[in-house]
Image (cartoon, grey):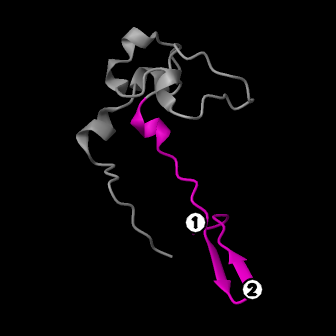
Amino acid sequence: MYYQLDNFYQNHRRYVKSRSNEQLMGNILEVSALEDCDPIKTNADLGESKLSVSGKSLVAENAAMPCGLVAKSFFTDEFTLKLGDVEQKIVSDNIAW
């Protein structure tokens, strides 16, 4: 199955530069050191989801970990094929050769 995303440019300079290599190497950085992560530097910049993986609320003014647009772009699209009453869900398991 093929589909197209509009207005999503992974090779756009702003997208590619919006990350912190230091942070991705495991270093804990203050928000002031995350200049390259613009526009997502703090937890408040994340938008509607402000919960950690464990379900705890994140402190809004703390540094987003990881920061930047690259870290925020994760697709969770799901597709279901239907033919009459029969449904076939498309899964992403074992898709690599």
Which residue was labeled with disc 2? 86
Which of the two marks, 1 or 2, is nearer to us in this view?
2
Residue placed most toward the observer, 58 or 93: 58
The image shows residue 67, relative to residue 80, as above or below, that is: above
Regarding residue 47, the answer to whether it shows in the image is yes
Regarding residue 25, the answer to whether it shows in the image is no
Residue 90 drawn at (x, y percent): 65, 71
| Residue at left offset 63%, top offset 79% | 81
Mark 2: amino acid? Val
Residue 21 drawn at (x, y percent): 40, 26
The image shows residue 75, relative to residue 44, as above or below, that is: below
**Quarter-of-image position of residue 3:** bottom left
Checking the image for residue 11, the label placed there is none
The image shows residue 2, relative to residue 93, as above or below, that is: below
Residue placed most toward the observer, 54 or 17: 54
Which residues make up the magenta segment?
A: 68-97
Which residue was labeled with disc 1? 96
| Residue at left offset 51%, top offset 22% | 44
The image shows residue 33, relative to residue 57, as above or below, that is: above
| Residue at left offset 40%, top offset 36% | 69
Does 84 sit left or right of 30 as displayed?
A: right
Asked if the magenta segment contains residue 76, the reply would be yes
